[in-house]
Image (tube, rainbow, N blue to C red):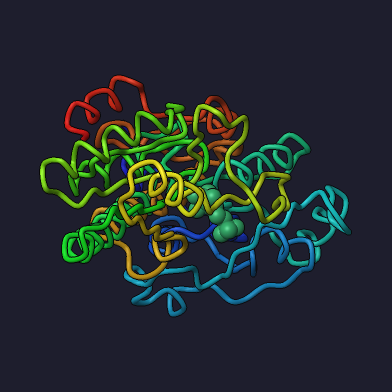
Amino acid sequence: MCPPLAAVGKNSDMRIGVLTSGGDAPGLNAVIRGAVLNGERQYGLDFVGIRDGWRGLVDADFQPLERQHVKGIGKLGGTILGSSRTNPFEGKGGIDRINQVMADAGMDAILAIGGEGSLAAANRLYEAGIKIVGVPKTVDNDLSATDYTFGFDTAVNIATEAMDRLRTTGDSHHRCMVAEVMGRHVGWIALHSGMAVGAHAILIPERKTSLEEIVGWVSSAVERGRAPLVCVAEGFLLDTMDDAHSERGLDAFGRPRLGGIGEKLAPLIEKATGIETRATTLGHIQRGGTPSAFDRVLATRFGMNAARLIAEKQWGNIVALRGTDIITTSLESALGELKTVPLERWDEAALLFG
Ligand code: F6P
Protein backbone atom coordinates (compact mmCIF):
# COMPACT_ATOMS: atom_id res chain seq x y z
CA MET A 1 0.00 0.00 0.00
CA CYS A 2 1.28 3.46 -0.78
CA PRO A 3 1.31 6.24 1.83
CA PRO A 4 -1.46 8.88 1.73
CA LEU A 5 -1.02 11.16 -1.25
CA ALA A 6 -0.51 14.29 0.85
CA ALA A 7 1.96 12.79 3.34
CA VAL A 8 5.02 14.64 2.00
CA GLY A 9 5.76 18.33 2.47
CA LYS A 10 5.67 20.98 -0.27
CA ASN A 11 8.63 21.12 -2.69
CA SER A 12 7.85 24.35 -4.51
CA ASP A 13 11.48 24.61 -5.58
CA MET A 14 11.22 21.54 -7.86
CA ARG A 15 10.54 21.90 -11.58
CA ILE A 16 9.55 18.69 -13.33
CA GLY A 17 9.69 18.03 -17.06
CA VAL A 18 6.92 15.69 -18.24
CA LEU A 19 7.18 13.62 -21.42
CA THR A 20 5.15 10.93 -23.15
CA SER A 21 7.24 8.58 -25.27
CA GLY A 22 6.70 5.64 -27.60
CA GLY A 23 3.39 4.53 -29.11
CA ASP A 24 0.52 6.49 -27.59
CA ALA A 25 -2.15 4.84 -25.42
CA PRO A 26 -5.60 6.09 -24.38
CA GLY A 27 -5.13 7.52 -20.87
CA LEU A 28 -1.87 9.44 -21.39
CA ASN A 29 -3.65 12.76 -20.88
CA ALA A 30 -5.29 11.48 -17.70
CA VAL A 31 -1.81 10.63 -16.34
CA ILE A 32 -0.55 14.12 -17.18
CA ARG A 33 -3.61 15.71 -15.55
CA GLY A 34 -3.35 13.53 -12.42
CA ALA A 35 0.34 14.35 -12.00
CA VAL A 36 -0.01 18.10 -12.55
CA LEU A 37 -3.10 18.58 -10.38
CA ASN A 38 -1.87 16.47 -7.51
CA GLY A 39 1.73 17.67 -7.85
CA GLU A 40 0.70 21.33 -7.74
CA ARG A 41 -1.96 21.02 -5.05
CA GLN A 42 -0.35 18.62 -2.60
CA TYR A 43 3.36 19.14 -3.12
CA GLY A 44 3.81 22.55 -4.72
CA LEU A 45 5.64 21.07 -7.72
CA ASP A 46 6.06 23.03 -10.96
CA PHE A 47 5.70 21.25 -14.29
CA VAL A 48 6.86 21.91 -17.81
CA GLY A 49 5.78 19.87 -20.85
CA ILE A 50 8.44 18.26 -23.04
CA ARG A 51 7.21 17.89 -26.62
CA ASP A 52 7.29 14.57 -28.51
CA GLY A 53 8.99 12.38 -25.93
CA TRP A 54 12.77 12.23 -25.74
CA ARG A 55 13.05 14.32 -28.92
CA GLY A 56 11.78 17.39 -27.06
CA LEU A 57 14.29 16.86 -24.27
CA VAL A 58 17.21 16.57 -26.66
CA ASP A 59 15.97 19.56 -28.73
CA ALA A 60 14.91 21.65 -25.69
CA ASP A 61 11.40 21.87 -27.11
CA PHE A 62 9.03 22.66 -24.23
CA GLN A 63 5.51 23.87 -23.56
CA PRO A 64 3.83 25.30 -20.47
CA LEU A 65 2.17 22.71 -18.25
CA GLU A 66 0.18 24.22 -15.46
CA ARG A 67 -3.20 23.54 -13.98
CA GLN A 68 -4.99 25.57 -16.66
CA HIS A 69 -3.37 23.45 -19.41
CA VAL A 70 -4.71 20.14 -18.08
CA LYS A 71 -8.30 21.13 -17.46
CA GLY A 72 -10.72 18.67 -19.04
CA ILE A 73 -8.03 16.56 -20.73
CA GLY A 74 -8.61 13.34 -18.73
CA LYS A 75 -11.18 12.13 -21.24
CA LEU A 76 -9.15 12.99 -24.35
CA GLY A 77 -7.30 10.39 -26.41
CA GLY A 78 -3.72 10.91 -27.58
CA THR A 79 -1.33 13.10 -25.62
CA ILE A 80 -1.30 16.89 -25.41
CA LEU A 81 2.51 16.68 -25.28
CA GLY A 82 2.94 14.63 -28.46
CA SER A 83 5.02 11.47 -28.62
CA SER A 84 7.78 9.91 -30.69
CA ARG A 85 9.94 6.84 -30.70
CA THR A 86 13.12 8.92 -30.52
CA ASN A 87 16.05 7.29 -28.74
CA PRO A 88 17.61 9.98 -26.47
CA PHE A 89 21.07 8.48 -26.87
CA GLU A 90 21.10 8.76 -30.64
CA GLY A 91 21.82 11.72 -32.94
CA LYS A 92 22.76 14.85 -30.99
CA GLY A 93 21.36 13.29 -27.79
CA GLY A 94 23.32 11.67 -24.96
CA ILE A 95 23.80 12.35 -21.30
CA ASP A 96 25.89 15.54 -21.61
CA ARG A 97 23.40 17.17 -23.94
CA ILE A 98 20.45 16.23 -21.68
CA ASN A 99 22.20 17.51 -18.53
CA GLN A 100 22.87 20.79 -20.32
CA VAL A 101 19.29 21.16 -21.58
CA MET A 102 17.89 20.44 -18.11
CA ALA A 103 20.25 22.90 -16.43
CA ASP A 104 19.41 25.64 -18.97
CA ALA A 105 15.68 25.06 -18.42
CA GLY A 106 16.00 24.90 -14.62
CA MET A 107 14.53 21.41 -14.78
CA ASP A 108 15.26 19.30 -11.70
CA ALA A 109 13.71 15.99 -12.67
CA ILE A 110 11.75 14.17 -15.34
CA LEU A 111 8.47 12.30 -15.29
CA ALA A 112 8.71 9.82 -18.18
CA ILE A 113 5.50 8.10 -19.29
CA GLY A 114 6.42 5.29 -21.65
CA GLY A 115 6.60 1.63 -22.52
CA GLU A 116 9.43 -0.87 -22.40
CA GLY A 117 11.76 0.95 -24.86
CA SER A 118 11.13 4.37 -23.33
CA LEU A 119 11.57 3.12 -19.76
CA ALA A 120 14.82 1.39 -20.77
CA ALA A 121 16.09 4.78 -21.96
CA ALA A 122 14.80 6.35 -18.71
CA ASN A 123 16.70 3.76 -16.69
CA ARG A 124 19.93 4.46 -18.59
CA LEU A 125 19.52 8.18 -17.90
CA TYR A 126 18.77 7.45 -14.23
CA GLU A 127 21.94 5.34 -13.98
CA ALA A 128 23.82 8.28 -15.47
CA GLY A 129 22.56 10.50 -12.63
CA ILE A 130 19.36 12.08 -13.98
CA LYS A 131 16.45 12.28 -11.55
CA ILE A 132 13.64 10.33 -13.15
CA VAL A 133 10.33 8.81 -12.14
CA GLY A 134 8.39 6.64 -14.61
CA VAL A 135 4.82 5.67 -15.43
CA PRO A 136 4.42 2.41 -17.37
CA LYS A 137 2.39 2.61 -20.57
CA THR A 138 1.49 0.10 -23.26
CA VAL A 139 -1.76 -0.97 -24.87
CA ASP A 140 -0.21 -4.43 -25.22
CA ASN A 141 -0.29 -4.88 -21.40
CA ASP A 142 3.04 -6.72 -21.59
CA LEU A 143 4.94 -5.19 -18.65
CA SER A 144 5.32 -7.70 -15.82
CA ALA A 145 5.92 -4.90 -13.30
CA THR A 146 2.21 -4.03 -13.33
CA ASP A 147 -1.00 -6.06 -13.43
CA TYR A 148 -2.52 -3.68 -15.98
CA THR A 149 -1.41 -0.71 -18.01
CA PHE A 150 -3.86 2.02 -19.02
CA GLY A 151 -4.92 1.85 -22.66
CA PHE A 152 -5.28 -1.92 -22.66
CA ASP A 153 -8.91 -1.89 -21.53
CA THR A 154 -9.80 0.69 -24.20
CA ALA A 155 -7.99 -1.29 -26.92
CA VAL A 156 -9.85 -4.46 -25.90
CA ASN A 157 -13.18 -2.62 -26.00
CA ILE A 158 -12.45 -1.17 -29.45
CA ALA A 159 -11.31 -4.55 -30.82
CA THR A 160 -14.40 -6.21 -29.34
CA GLU A 161 -16.74 -3.71 -30.93
CA ALA A 162 -14.95 -3.99 -34.28
CA MET A 163 -15.12 -7.80 -34.27
CA ASP A 164 -18.81 -7.77 -33.30
CA ARG A 165 -19.27 -5.75 -36.50
CA LEU A 166 -17.11 -8.10 -38.55
CA ARG A 167 -19.27 -10.99 -37.39
CA THR A 168 -22.51 -9.54 -38.73
CA THR A 169 -21.08 -8.83 -42.17
CA GLY A 170 -19.32 -12.21 -42.14
CA ASP A 171 -22.65 -13.88 -41.32
CA SER A 172 -24.42 -12.07 -44.17
CA HIS A 173 -21.88 -13.22 -46.76
CA HIS A 174 -21.00 -16.62 -45.26
CA ARG A 175 -17.37 -15.56 -45.15
CA CYS A 176 -14.51 -16.29 -42.82
CA MET A 177 -13.36 -13.02 -41.25
CA VAL A 178 -9.82 -12.61 -39.94
CA ALA A 179 -9.31 -9.70 -37.53
CA GLU A 180 -5.76 -8.63 -36.73
CA VAL A 181 -5.29 -6.85 -33.41
CA MET A 182 -2.23 -5.31 -31.74
CA GLY A 183 0.18 -7.33 -29.62
CA ARG A 184 3.82 -7.18 -30.58
CA HIS A 185 5.15 -9.93 -28.30
CA VAL A 186 2.06 -10.90 -26.34
CA GLY A 187 -1.52 -11.85 -27.10
CA TRP A 188 -3.43 -10.13 -24.28
CA ILE A 189 -5.56 -7.93 -26.55
CA ALA A 190 -6.29 -10.92 -28.83
CA LEU A 191 -7.13 -13.20 -25.91
CA HIS A 192 -9.45 -10.77 -24.15
CA SER A 193 -11.22 -9.34 -27.21
CA GLY A 194 -11.31 -12.76 -28.91
CA MET A 195 -12.97 -14.33 -25.87
CA ALA A 196 -15.35 -11.39 -25.56
CA VAL A 197 -16.65 -11.88 -29.12
CA GLY A 198 -16.55 -15.69 -29.07
CA ALA A 199 -13.94 -15.97 -31.86
CA HIS A 200 -13.63 -19.42 -33.45
CA ALA A 201 -9.82 -19.19 -33.17
CA ILE A 202 -7.50 -16.87 -31.23
CA LEU A 203 -3.92 -16.79 -32.46
CA ILE A 204 -1.28 -15.31 -30.16
CA PRO A 205 2.51 -14.85 -30.29
CA GLU A 206 3.02 -17.13 -27.29
CA ARG A 207 1.53 -20.17 -29.08
CA LYS A 208 2.81 -21.06 -32.54
CA THR A 209 0.01 -22.80 -34.42
CA SER A 210 -0.13 -24.83 -37.62
CA LEU A 211 -2.29 -23.87 -40.58
CA GLU A 212 -3.94 -27.32 -40.27
CA GLU A 213 -5.10 -26.49 -36.74
CA ILE A 214 -6.52 -23.14 -37.84
CA VAL A 215 -8.23 -24.75 -40.83
CA GLY A 216 -9.71 -27.36 -38.47
CA TRP A 217 -11.34 -24.65 -36.31
CA VAL A 218 -12.57 -22.69 -39.32
CA SER A 219 -14.06 -25.79 -40.99
CA SER A 220 -15.77 -26.95 -37.83
CA ALA A 221 -17.44 -23.53 -37.43
CA VAL A 222 -18.61 -23.67 -41.06
CA GLU A 223 -19.99 -27.18 -40.58
CA ARG A 224 -22.15 -25.83 -37.76
CA GLY A 225 -23.47 -23.15 -40.08
CA ARG A 226 -21.41 -20.33 -38.60
CA ALA A 227 -19.35 -17.67 -40.37
CA PRO A 228 -15.93 -18.19 -38.77
CA LEU A 229 -14.11 -15.36 -37.02
CA VAL A 230 -10.35 -15.68 -36.47
CA CYS A 231 -8.72 -13.17 -34.10
CA VAL A 232 -4.97 -12.91 -34.64
CA ALA A 233 -2.38 -10.83 -32.77
CA GLU A 234 0.06 -8.99 -35.03
CA GLY A 235 3.00 -10.88 -33.46
CA PHE A 236 1.53 -14.36 -34.13
CA LEU A 237 3.72 -16.96 -35.87
CA LEU A 238 2.62 -19.98 -37.83
CA ASP A 239 4.64 -23.03 -36.84
CA THR A 240 6.54 -22.64 -40.11
CA MET A 241 7.71 -19.09 -39.26
CA ASP A 242 10.86 -18.05 -37.37
CA ASP A 243 9.98 -14.38 -36.91
CA ALA A 244 6.80 -12.34 -36.66
CA HIS A 245 5.53 -10.98 -39.97
CA SER A 246 7.09 -7.59 -40.67
CA GLU A 247 7.35 -5.68 -43.90
CA ARG A 248 7.99 -2.10 -42.73
CA GLY A 249 11.54 -2.16 -41.34
CA LEU A 250 12.65 -1.31 -37.80
CA ASP A 251 11.62 1.45 -35.38
CA ALA A 252 14.08 3.80 -33.60
CA PHE A 253 14.65 1.21 -30.88
CA GLY A 254 15.57 -1.42 -33.51
CA ARG A 255 12.32 -3.39 -33.18
CA PRO A 256 10.51 -4.66 -36.28
CA ARG A 257 7.35 -2.77 -37.21
CA LEU A 258 4.68 -5.45 -37.27
CA GLY A 259 1.33 -5.74 -39.04
CA GLY A 260 0.03 -7.79 -41.94
CA ILE A 261 -0.16 -11.34 -40.57
CA GLY A 262 -3.98 -11.30 -41.00
CA GLU A 263 -3.63 -10.49 -44.71
CA LYS A 264 -1.08 -13.27 -44.97
CA LEU A 265 -3.31 -15.85 -43.28
CA ALA A 266 -6.54 -15.04 -45.13
CA PRO A 267 -5.56 -16.49 -48.56
CA LEU A 268 -4.01 -19.53 -46.88
CA ILE A 269 -7.27 -20.22 -45.03
CA GLU A 270 -9.31 -19.58 -48.19
CA LYS A 271 -7.15 -21.94 -50.24
CA ALA A 272 -7.26 -24.70 -47.66
CA THR A 273 -11.00 -24.47 -46.87
CA GLY A 274 -12.55 -23.07 -50.06
CA ILE A 275 -14.34 -20.49 -47.88
CA GLU A 276 -14.09 -16.88 -49.00
CA THR A 277 -11.90 -15.22 -46.39
CA ARG A 278 -11.32 -11.51 -45.71
CA ALA A 279 -8.81 -9.87 -43.40
CA THR A 280 -9.14 -6.60 -41.48
CA THR A 281 -6.21 -5.03 -39.67
CA LEU A 282 -7.52 -2.90 -36.81
CA GLY A 283 -4.16 -1.19 -36.33
CA HIS A 284 -4.03 2.23 -34.72
CA ILE A 285 -7.80 2.49 -34.32
CA GLN A 286 -7.15 0.50 -31.14
CA ARG A 287 -4.95 3.25 -29.75
CA GLY A 288 -6.99 6.26 -30.78
CA GLY A 289 -9.91 8.08 -29.23
CA THR A 290 -11.35 8.46 -25.81
CA PRO A 291 -10.12 6.19 -22.99
CA SER A 292 -12.52 3.84 -21.18
CA ALA A 293 -13.59 4.71 -17.63
CA PHE A 294 -11.28 1.97 -16.29
CA ASP A 295 -8.30 3.46 -18.12
CA ARG A 296 -9.13 7.01 -17.01
CA VAL A 297 -9.20 5.94 -13.37
CA LEU A 298 -6.01 3.86 -13.60
CA ALA A 299 -4.17 6.60 -15.50
CA THR A 300 -5.30 9.31 -13.06
CA ARG A 301 -4.11 7.21 -10.11
CA PHE A 302 -0.78 6.55 -11.85
CA GLY A 303 -0.29 10.27 -12.47
CA MET A 304 -1.26 11.30 -8.93
CA ASN A 305 1.07 8.72 -7.40
CA ALA A 306 3.91 9.59 -9.77
CA ALA A 307 3.71 13.14 -8.37
CA ARG A 308 4.00 11.65 -4.90
CA LEU A 309 7.11 9.64 -5.89
CA ILE A 310 8.67 12.85 -7.21
CA ALA A 311 7.87 14.71 -3.98
CA GLU A 312 9.43 11.82 -2.05
CA LYS A 313 12.46 11.93 -4.40
CA GLN A 314 12.02 8.27 -5.21
CA TRP A 315 14.19 8.53 -8.33
CA GLY A 316 14.58 5.46 -10.53
CA ASN A 317 11.12 4.18 -9.63
CA ILE A 318 7.80 3.74 -11.38
CA VAL A 319 4.22 3.38 -10.21
CA ALA A 320 2.42 0.11 -10.92
CA LEU A 321 -0.85 -1.68 -10.19
CA ARG A 322 -0.99 -4.77 -7.95
CA GLY A 323 -4.53 -5.98 -7.47
CA THR A 324 -6.31 -2.71 -6.81
CA ASP A 325 -3.35 -1.00 -5.08
CA ILE A 326 -0.91 1.43 -6.64
CA ILE A 327 2.59 0.30 -5.68
CA THR A 328 6.12 1.56 -6.27
CA THR A 329 8.71 -0.54 -8.06
CA SER A 330 12.03 0.09 -9.78
CA LEU A 331 12.44 1.20 -13.39
CA GLU A 332 14.59 -1.86 -13.78
CA SER A 333 11.70 -4.14 -12.81
CA ALA A 334 9.74 -2.79 -15.79
CA LEU A 335 12.50 -4.02 -18.07
CA GLY A 336 12.60 -7.60 -16.86
CA GLU A 337 10.57 -10.36 -18.40
CA LEU A 338 7.62 -9.56 -20.58
CA LYS A 339 4.23 -10.44 -19.12
CA THR A 340 3.17 -13.07 -21.64
CA VAL A 341 -0.17 -14.86 -21.79
CA PRO A 342 0.17 -18.07 -19.72
CA LEU A 343 -0.51 -21.07 -21.94
CA GLU A 344 -3.22 -22.25 -19.53
CA ARG A 345 -5.16 -19.08 -20.36
CA TRP A 346 -4.94 -19.83 -24.09
CA ASP A 347 -5.79 -23.52 -23.51
CA GLU A 348 -8.85 -22.41 -21.57
CA ALA A 349 -10.00 -20.15 -24.42
CA ALA A 350 -9.22 -22.88 -26.99
CA LEU A 351 -11.79 -25.20 -25.38
CA LEU A 352 -14.42 -23.10 -27.18
CA PHE A 353 -12.64 -22.73 -30.57
CA GLY A 354 -14.11 -24.16 -33.76
O1 F6P B 1 3.74 -1.24 -28.37
C1 F6P B 1 2.45 -0.84 -28.61
C2 F6P B 1 2.12 -1.00 -30.08
O2 F6P B 1 0.81 -0.49 -30.27
C3 F6P B 1 2.27 -2.41 -30.62
O3 F6P B 1 1.15 -3.21 -30.38
C4 F6P B 1 2.52 -2.14 -32.09
O4 F6P B 1 3.31 -3.15 -32.67
C5 F6P B 1 3.28 -0.87 -32.08
O5 F6P B 1 2.99 -0.20 -30.88
C6 F6P B 1 2.97 0.01 -33.27
O6 F6P B 1 3.84 1.08 -33.24
P1 F6P B 1 3.79 2.35 -34.19
O7 F6P B 1 2.67 3.22 -33.74
O8 F6P B 1 5.12 3.00 -34.03
O9 F6P B 1 3.55 1.84 -35.58
In which image quadrant can residue 100 be found? bottom right
Answer with left or right where residue 204 lies relative to residue 84: left
Which residue corresponds to the image point at 31% horizontal and 46% vertical from the top-left? 230
- Asked whether 4 or 146 is in front, the reply is 146
The quarter of the image holding the C terminus is: top left
The quarter of the image holding the N terminus is: top left
Please, which residue is most extreme toward the top here?
A: 344
Q: Is residue 158 visible?
A: yes
Which residue corresponds to the image point at 33% horizontal and 43% vertical from the top-left? 273
Q: Is residue 13 visible?
A: no
Please, which residue is most extreme toward the left here?
A: 224
Image location (x, y in percent) of residue 223: 15, 41
Image location (x, y in percent) of residue 248: 67, 56
In which image quadrant can residue 290 be found? bottom left
Image location (x, y in percent) of residue 270: 38, 49
Q: Is residue 275 above or below residue 283?
A: above
Which residue corresponds to the image point at 67% horizontal and 44% vertical from the top-left? 255
Q: Is residue 336 above or below residue 165?
A: above
Which residue corresponds to the image point at 23% horizontal and 60% vertical from the top-left? 170
Image location (x, y in percent) of residue 165: 22, 64
Q: Is residue 218 above or below residue 329?
A: below
In which image quadrant can residue 335 be found? top right
- Asked whether 311 or 281 is in front, the reply is 281
- Asked whether 274 or 331 is in front, the reply is 274
- Asked whether 94 or 309 is in front, the reply is 94
Answer with left or right where residue 307 lies relative to residue 61: left
- Counting every numbered tag in the picture gives 0
Q: Is residue 306 above or below residue 326?
A: below
